[in-house]
């Protein structure tokens, strides 16, 4: 994330929270955002201002609900609220009023941080981390340089389809386990296990590395610490922020998948997955890896209406802060991804099928690119308005690596996608961002590239994903260039239209 943590603190964080703006007026007052060519057109993001972590995504009463970290006061980190959007299909979103805001002089006065939503006998219940100044140095759990805060776990319930929330007067968990010198204490993840609730929290122990803390409760209000679900190892890197060095594991998500369990953690600017067995209230990982390469963090999952495990993540900005402040928006939600496990217990993911409803009329090429019709068709293909899905299938060949360029009609470079197979391994890249591939050599490889303003998401079969930010706005459509004799068997290109009126329309 290029040294931009979700916990990069701003001066004046403890200032009084400004009044919450209405979504409609925010969109009206920021109508110029709709014409910003760098602003994504079919990814979820607020009408304006700052977004980061997904919080408590859930399918409830026939609609998908996405909550997320949101600053209503501008396009910068600070004054964290829970934003809220709803959708019938995970693609077309309706902005709802802010769900949960900090309470003046309350235990979450400096921010309503990340958390989860569960149904307690049918009642939507949000468990989140509240942030406030510590009353003494010993209470501080969140540290970034000279800044310190106290993190507590808080609860709110809703009785009107999650439009409004009522908080408990006190936190349900006020401090970490006694005797632990923690590097953080936040981002609850919950599930029902038998007759009780279980919760894990992201944390770390000073000098020992990241740790996931396990708790249990009969009623979501009284919690007992069990033990670490999983402990890391001390890292060699040093940083003023323990997240950057790996001494703090953020945003844990723990869930069953197939006959295994999966743990997701965010640290060192990446999302890591671990697959293994959960027995006797401990997690025993057997396989591990990174969810993807590039600009992607703070992943959370949910179950969709069909029972699929859906992954969401925050796509942060990688341009200078002054640029996204001036633009009036920052942060994007990834496209939804379906998670599965292969026989080798390696986590796999593909774009959710719902994404395909965005497609317009396809342009297609079948067979070798050397034929005259294929050459003519490729020369005519264009990605308009920086919004499209490009799918290419080819047979990897060590003698003919793939090199695909997206350029403007004025021949200005936009992106280069490359695949190379060598004795040392197989590698996929967008510009300078690289990802290793586990697909067997000689088997067809299908690349699916989503171009959406400044966001590019590239999927390679089910084994690798790269999310890249490119802050270039060509004045003409993008053409597609491929090296001669590239072993391509098919190319499909679909235009994609904006999903709502607050997106690019020109």
Image (spheres, rainbow, N blue to C red):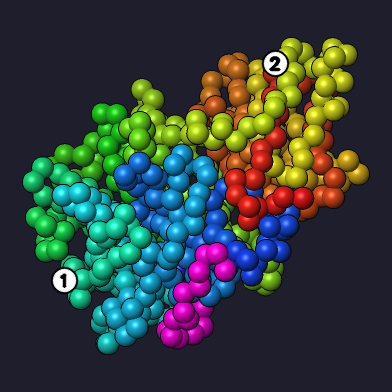
Assign a secondary structure to mark 1. loop
Image location of residue 495, percent across then percent down:
70, 35
In the image: residue 220, left or right of residue 98:
left
Rendered residue at 60%/59% (across/down): 317
Report the magenta stretch's main SS: loop
Magenta stretch: residue 148 in it? Answer: no
> In 3D space, how far apart are the residues under numbered discs 2 and 1 (Cα atoms)?
61 Å
Magenta segment boundaries in residue numbering: 9-25
- Residue 178 is tagged as 1
Rendered residue at 73%/57% (across/down): 35
User: Residue 285 or 456: which is nearer the viewer?
Assistant: 456
Q: State the image quarter where residue 110 is shown.
A: bottom left
Taking the image as drawn, is residue 7 in sight? yes
Magenta stretch: residue 22 in it? Answer: yes
Image location of residue 493, percent across then percent down:
70, 29
Name the residue that disc number 2 marks: 489
Q: Earlier in the sequence, mark 2 or mark 1?
A: 1
In the image: residue 230, left or right of residue 379:
left
Where 209 sits versus 412, above or below? below
Rendered residue at 46%/39% (across/down): 89
């Amino acid at each position: 994330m290029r040294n931009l943590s979700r916990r990069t603190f701003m001066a004046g964080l403890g200032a009084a929270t400004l009044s919450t703006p209405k979504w409609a007026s925010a969109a009206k007052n920021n109508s110029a955002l709709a014409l910003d060519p760098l602003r994504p057109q079919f990814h979820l993001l607020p009408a304006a201002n700052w977004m980061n972590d997904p919080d408590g995504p859930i399918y409830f009463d026939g609609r998908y609900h996405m909550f997320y970290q949101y600053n209503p006061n501008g396009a910068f980190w600070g004054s964290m609220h829970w934003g809220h959007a709803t959708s019938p299909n995970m693609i077309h979103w309706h902005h709802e009023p802010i769900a949960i805001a900090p309470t003046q002089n309350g235990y979450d006065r400096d921010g309503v941080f990340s958390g989860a939503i569960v149904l307690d006998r049918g009642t939507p219940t949000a468990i989140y981390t509240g942030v406030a100044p510590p009353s003494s140095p010993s209470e501080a759990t969140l540290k970034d340089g000279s800044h310190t805060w106290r993190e507590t776990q808080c609860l709110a319930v809703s009785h009107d389809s999650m439009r409004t929330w009522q908080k408990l007067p006190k936190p349900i968990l006020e401090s970490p386990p006694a005797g632990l010198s923690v590097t953080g204490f936040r981002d609850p993840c919950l599930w029902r296990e038998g007759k009780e609730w279980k919760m894990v929290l992201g944390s770390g122990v000073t000098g020992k590395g990241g740790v996931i803390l396990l708790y249990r409760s009969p009623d979501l209000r009284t919690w007992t610490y069990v033990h670490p679900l999983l402990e890391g190892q001390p890292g060699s890197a040093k940083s003023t922020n323990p997240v950057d060095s790996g001494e703090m594991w953020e945003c844990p998500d723990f869930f069953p998948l197939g006959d295994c369990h999966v743990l997701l953690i965010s640290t060192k600017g990446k999302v890591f997955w671990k697959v293994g067995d959960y027995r006797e209230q401990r997690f025993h990982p057997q396989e591990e890896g990174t969810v993807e390469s590039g600009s992607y963090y703070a992943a959370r999952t949910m179950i969709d209406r069909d029972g699929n495990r859906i992954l969401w993540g925050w796509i942060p900005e990688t341009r200078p802060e002054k640029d996204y402040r001036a633009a009036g928006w920052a942060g994007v939600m990834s496209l939804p991804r379906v998670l599965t496990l292969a026989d080798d217990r390696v986590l796999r993911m593909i774009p959710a099928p719902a994404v395909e409803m965005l497609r317009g009329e396809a342009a297609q090429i079948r067979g070798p690119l050397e034929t005259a019709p294929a050459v003519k068709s490729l020369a005519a293909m264009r990605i308009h308005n920086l919004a499209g899905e490009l799918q290419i299938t080819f047979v990897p060949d060590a003698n003919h690596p793939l090199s695909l360029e997206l350029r403007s009609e004025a021949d200005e470079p936009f992106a280069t996608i490359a695949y190379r197979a060598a004795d040392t391994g197989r590698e996929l890249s967008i510009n300078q961002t690289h990802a290793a591939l586990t697909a067997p050599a000689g088997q067809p490889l299908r690349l699916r590239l989503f171009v959406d303003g400044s966001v590019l998401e590239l999927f390679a079969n089910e084994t690798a994903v790269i999310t890249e930010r490119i802050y270039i706005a060509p004045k003409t459509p993008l053409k597609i260039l491929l090296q001669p004799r590239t072993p391509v068997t098919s190319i499909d290109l679909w235009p994609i239209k904006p999903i709502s009126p607050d997106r690019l329309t020109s």
